[in-house]
Amino acid sequence: MHLILVHPPQDTLSAVDGRLIPAPRLSPGPLFARSNAHARQAMLDAPTEACVIMETQRLRTVQHPARVGDLLDSLLGTQQMIPPGLIRVVSASLLPAPLRLLSRCIERRDGAWRAWTDGARVWFFEALLSLALSRERGKPVIQLKEYDEAGDLVRVRTFVSTAAHGWQRCA
């Protein structure tokens, strides 16, 4: 907030006859209108900044690994990416070595992973919440990566969660 300090004008002596000439009185109109307009603008800007900060905090809460895991479960469940009849792998120690290393890296980056197996093949997914895209869209946006058993990246897709249509693939 900016404060404008105005010193009241001083009465002056006339150089012609030595009389005291009262100083002109300022009307509060334009001065206060100008400062009120500035104050109003500051007040309008503040909620926007506060909303961005609050939205970032909300998204950081969603970014917590447990929440990202919930979002990943929801995404995988609705997109039918997992063939029926597979067994979920819940411990990284049961994964092949490359995927075990990858799972540790994902957990350090506050992401989440899920894996399934049929005994021969492993379906391994990584999810990271994109703060920038989530803030832009006002909804959670997940970057989903799929890996093969060797830890090689198979595909990357981005999805946004919408109330009306569930998970939608981003263009």
Image: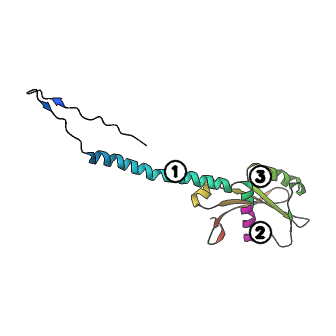
Whether residue 123 is visible, yes or no, is no
Whether residue 34 is visible, yes or no, is yes
Q: Residues within 10 Å of mark 2 (few under 14, many from 20)?
A: few
Q: Quadrant of residue 95?
A: bottom right
According to the picture, the residue beneath numbered tag 2 turns out to be 81
Question: Type of residue at label 2?
Answer: Met
According to the picture, the residue beneath numbered tag 1 turns out to be 49
Q: Residues within 10 Å of mark 3 (few under 14, many from 20)?
A: some
- Marks 1 and 3: which is nearer the front? 1
Precedes in sequence: disc 2 or disc 1? 1
> Looking at the rendering, in which quadrant would you find the N terminus?
top left
Instruction: Give 150 or 165, whichever is nearer the viewer.
Output: 165
Q: Is residue 80 left or right of residue 158?
A: right
Instruction: Give 109 or 35, whichever is nearer the viewer.
Output: 35
Instruction: Give 137 or 66, whichever is nearer the viewer.
Output: 66
The range drawn in magenta is 70-86
Q: Determine if the magenta segment contains residue 140.
A: no
Labelled pair 2, 1 in contact (Cβ < 8 Å): no
In the structure shown, which secondary structural element does the residue marked by tag 3 occupy?
Answer: helix
Precedes in sequence: disc 1 or disc 3? 1
Q: Is residue 117 left or right of residue 125?
A: right
Q: Quadrant of residue 4?
A: top left
Across and down, in percent, residue 64 comes to 71, 54
Q: What residue sits 40% from the left and 51% below the top?
A: 40
According to the picture, the residue beneath numbered tag 3 turns out to be 106
Spatial CA distance of label 1 from label 3 is 31 Å
Q: What residue sits 19% from the left and 32% below the top?
A: 11
